Amino acid sequence: MGIVKIEDRLHEEAREASTVMCRSINAQAEFWMKIGMLAERNPTLSFNEIVKTQLANGPVGLVEAEAA
């Protein structure tokens, strides 16, 4: 574990997003870093495709929602 220095404004944005997403500030920052890393490694995938892939590979099963 280490310390990462970020700009005050980015920290504030992470704090605001963490409240909305019911995550800690650290968990929100970690989520953004992971998604950013995956986006750089997979530039043709959309955000939704990246999340779908992560859900399919994770411990939580992915259930396809029916279109309304």
Image (tube, helix red, strand yellow):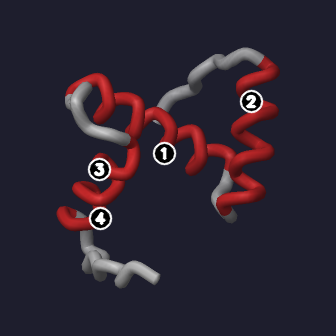
| Residues at marks 1 and 4, CA–CA distance in whole angstroms | 13 Å
Provide the residue designation for mark 2: 11
Earlier sequence position, callout 3 versus callout 2: 2
Dot 2, crowdedness within 10 Å: few (<14), some or many (≥20)?
Answer: some
Q: Position of residue 64 (x, y in %)?
A: 29, 78
Earlier sequence position, callout 4 versus callout 3: 3
Provide the residue designation for mark 3: 49
Residue found 21% across the figure and 66% down from its top: 56
Secondary structure category for the residue under label 4: helix
Indicate left or right for 4 with 14 as reference: left
Q: Position of residue 3 (x, y in %)?
A: 57, 26
Picture quadrant of residue 22 = bottom right
Name the amino acid type tagged 2.
Answer: His
| Residues at marks 3 and 2, CA–CA distance in whole angstroms | 26 Å
Dot 4, crowdedness within 10 Å: few (<14), some or many (≥20)?
Answer: some
Dot 1, crowdedness within 10 Å: few (<14), some or many (≥20)?
Answer: few
